[in-house]
Image: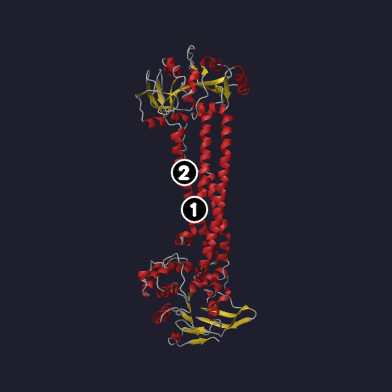
């Protein structure tokens, strides 16, 4: 589902990141680990199409991301790539449900409140749907951001340190939800983390050095 | 959807937008109130002088003569001899001459002695009852009738002088024979009868005028009814319309030199009032625009500050598939919403203020501003300008949203 070849990225000429090639098929989970400063977040942004690589190719569902630019890349990202960040951020002025509906509207041009409600119910957030995101607990917020990431049936689900601010119980819950939601959506799941707790859960890992 | 988010963003942090909204409201209210006032002021003044070329009256301030005889908002300059006035009234240069005789009032509303021509000039028609035909019969203007709660068939005693609370004329009662339809002119606030009524009202009464010589309540009456002299009919002023424009040019000097009377031009006097008011209105208008500029600055600062807080939110929208253009729109729309809200509330505020001013003016001057509708095209321009300011204020923040580096924003939480 996602494959990279010889990708490099340079913020400036002095520091160039070279990333090992990676492959992750639909339904698979890849754990990317590494100390800070090894470019974990940079790689995640490259995979999400938020940054263009200086060299190499990234293909998502056999499409080279470099083929897109500007508005079309934004649209492709919205439709096929879901991202969960370390801290769950939302459009603060909208309710949790509206945040999910907004995600479907931005990606597909149509609102899908039925799917949004269904996902919230699956993730145990049915009662929180009409609250503002800031009223939810951290664990609930992270679950809501997973719901938002999968609302458009993405082929690639990226998670950047999704559990680092959570306690053990919530970390386990979120990790399992990520995996089950990725499987349900038929998406490749890539988790970037330095969280030791996750290494026990996932077998396929890629260590950046 | 973007429109909705922009609106909810404003409501989410109302304090951020409050100052901008208040300033916008204030500036729009000031400007729109001035537009309304100026417009209606001029309209009211100009509609009343239509068809009056010159006004003949006693010597004194020409402005006072115009204000008293045309607008009924000042005391008359004095009385003039009817016989002498008639020499001018019957001149072939004159197309129409309407004599006016003041003297009495009823509970603050002037009783005017004149001819039916006066009502014709203001296109005042009788809504109920009939026109006055005999002495002491009067018709009442629509506003006056409403406020006095008077109907056809009612009788009342006039009060000596123009202001309320003077001495009543108990000898003759006025009889209301008609109520006039509303005309939106000064006639609405008048009680109108024939000339003889006013004269006769004072005949039986002038003998004790000497005893009241010290009673200076209204000097025009002292001038009008010099005790001891033979009682000649007198009037207060004559509204003249000329057939020959030569009269308008030549007569004022001629009258001033050869008689004890004067001729005043309503157009000149009214323009004088406008130019006096104009300075004040101009200054207030500048103030309105200055506040408008300030509100633009305030919108800019508010947007700029919230943008700093919301950088992450905007980057998030991009990862969810929003384009740069949509982010720019979001910021622009927020500003436009704010300006639109300010415009609407400012418009409402100006109407409220006008309504308050109008009810105060109606009580003291019998003068009302009652057109509360949207002023096209001036207020259309005001709307365009307000939105323009909003657009301008949002330009830099919108550009910042457009050119936001998402990866950097997301990495530096």
Left or right: where B182 falls relative to B276: left
Q: Residue at x 44, y 68 (%)?
A: A99
Q: Chain of mark 2?
A: B
Please, which residue is most extreme toward the right here?
Answer: A13
Q: Residue at x 58, y 75 (%)?
A: A52
* Depicted B14 relative to depicted B256: above or below: below
Determine if residue B326 is in view.
no
Please name the residue that numbered disc 2 is placed on: B353
Q: Is residue A7 left or right of residue B316?
A: right
- What whole-number distance in Å separates the C-alpha atoms at marks 1 and 2? 16 Å
Residue A142: % across, % down: 43, 75
Q: Hey, which quadrant is residue B179 in on the image?
A: top left
Say if B373 sits above or below B108 in the image: below
Question: Callout 1: few (<14), some (14-19), or many (20+) C-alpha neighbours within 10 Å?
Answer: some
The tag earlier along the polypeptide, 1 or 2, is: 1
To which quarter of the image does residue B62 belong?
top right
Find residue B165 and report its horizontal and vertical position in percent.
40, 27
The residue that appears at 61% across and 17% down in the rendered structure is B258
Residue tagged 1: B22
Above or below: residue A15 compared with residue B319: below
Circle 1/circle 2 CB separation < 8 Å: no
Residue under the point 58% across and 74% down: A67
Which element is circle 1 on?
A: helix
Determine which of the numbered discs, if any, sits on residue B211 in the image.
none
Q: Nearer the viewer, residue A193 or B207?
A: B207
Among the 4 quarters of the image, the one containing residue B243: top right
> Which chain is mark 1 on?
B
Residue B322 pos. (x, y %): 51, 67
Residue A147 position within the rendered picture, expressed as x and y whole percent measured from the top left? 42, 73
């Amino acid at each position: 589902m996602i494959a990279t070849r010889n990708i490099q990225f340079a913020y400036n000429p002095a520091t160039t990141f070279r990333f090992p090639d990676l492959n992750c098929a639909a339904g698979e989970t890849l754990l990317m680990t590494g100390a800070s400063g090894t470019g974990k977040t940079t790689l995640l942004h490259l995979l999400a199409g938020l940054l263009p690589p200086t060299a190499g190719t990234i293909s998502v569902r056999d499409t080279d991301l470099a083929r897109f630019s500007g508005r079309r890349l934004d649209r492709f990202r919205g439709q096929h790539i879901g991202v969960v960040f370390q801290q769950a951020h939302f459009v603060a002025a909208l309710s949790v449900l509206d945040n999910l509906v907004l995600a479907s509207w931005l990606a597909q041009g149509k609102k899908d409140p039925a799917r949004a409600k269904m996902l919230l119910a699956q993730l145990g957030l049915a009662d929180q749907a009409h609250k503002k995101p800031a009223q939810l607990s951290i664990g609930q917020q992270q679950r809501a951001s997973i719901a938002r990431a999968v609302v458009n049936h993405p082929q690639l689900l990226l998670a950047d340190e999704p559990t680092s601010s959570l306690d053990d119980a919530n970390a386990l819950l979120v990790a399992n939800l990520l995996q089950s939601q990725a499987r349900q959506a038929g998406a490749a799941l890539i988790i970037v983390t330095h969280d030791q707790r996750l290494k026990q859960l996932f077998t396929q890992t890629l260590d950046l050095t | 959807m973007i429109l909705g988010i922009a609106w909810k963003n404003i409501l989410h942090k109302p304090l951020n937008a409050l100052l901008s909204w208040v300033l916008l409201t204030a500036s729009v209210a000031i400007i729109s109130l001035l537009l309304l006032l100026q417009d209606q002021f001029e309209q009211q003044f100009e509609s009343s002088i239509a068809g009056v070329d010159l006004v003949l009256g006693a010597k004194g301030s020409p402005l006072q003569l115009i204000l008293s005889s045309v607008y009924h908002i000042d005391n008359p300059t004095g009385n003039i001899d009817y016989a002498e006035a008639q020499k001018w009234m019957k001149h072939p240069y004159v197309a129409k001459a309407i004599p006016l005789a003041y003297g009495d009032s009823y509970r603050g509303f002037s009783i005017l002695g004149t001819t039916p021509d006066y009502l014709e000039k203001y296109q005042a028609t009788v809504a109920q009852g009939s026109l006055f035909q005999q002495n002491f019969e009067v018709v009442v203007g629509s506003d006056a009738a409403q406020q006095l709660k008077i109907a056809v068939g009612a009788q009342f005693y006039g009060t000596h002088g123009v202001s309320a609370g003077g001495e009543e004329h108990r000898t003759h009662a006025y009889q209301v024979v008609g109520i006039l339809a509303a005309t939106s002119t000064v006639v609405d606030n008048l009680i109108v009868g024939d000339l003889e009524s006013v004269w006769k009202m004072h005949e039986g009464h002038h003998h004790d005028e000497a005893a009241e010589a010290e009673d200076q309540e209204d000097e025009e009456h002292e001038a009008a009814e010099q005790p001891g002299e033979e009682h000649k009919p007198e009037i207060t002023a004559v509204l003249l319309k000329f057939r020959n424009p030569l009269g308008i040019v030549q007569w004022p000097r001629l009258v001033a030199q050869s008689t004890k009377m004067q001729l005043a031009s309503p157009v000149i006097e009214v323009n004088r009032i406008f130019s006096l008011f104009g300075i004040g209105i101009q200054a207030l208008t500048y103030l309105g625009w200055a506040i408008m500029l300030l509100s633009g600055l305030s919108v800019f600062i508010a947007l700029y500050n919230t943008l700093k807080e919301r950088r992450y939110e905007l980057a998030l929208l991009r990862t969810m598939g929003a384009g740069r253009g949509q982010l720019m729109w979001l910021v622009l729309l927020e500003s436009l919403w704010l300006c639109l809200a300010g415009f609407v509330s400012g418009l409402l505020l100006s109407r409220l203020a006008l309504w308050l001013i109008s009810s105060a003016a109606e009580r003291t001057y019998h003068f009302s501003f009652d057109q509360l509708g949207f002023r096209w095209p001036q207020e259309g321009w005001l709307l365009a300008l307000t939105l323009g300011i909003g657009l301008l204020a949002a330009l830099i923040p919108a550009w910042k949203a457009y050119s936001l580096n998402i990866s950097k924003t997301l990495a530096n939480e």
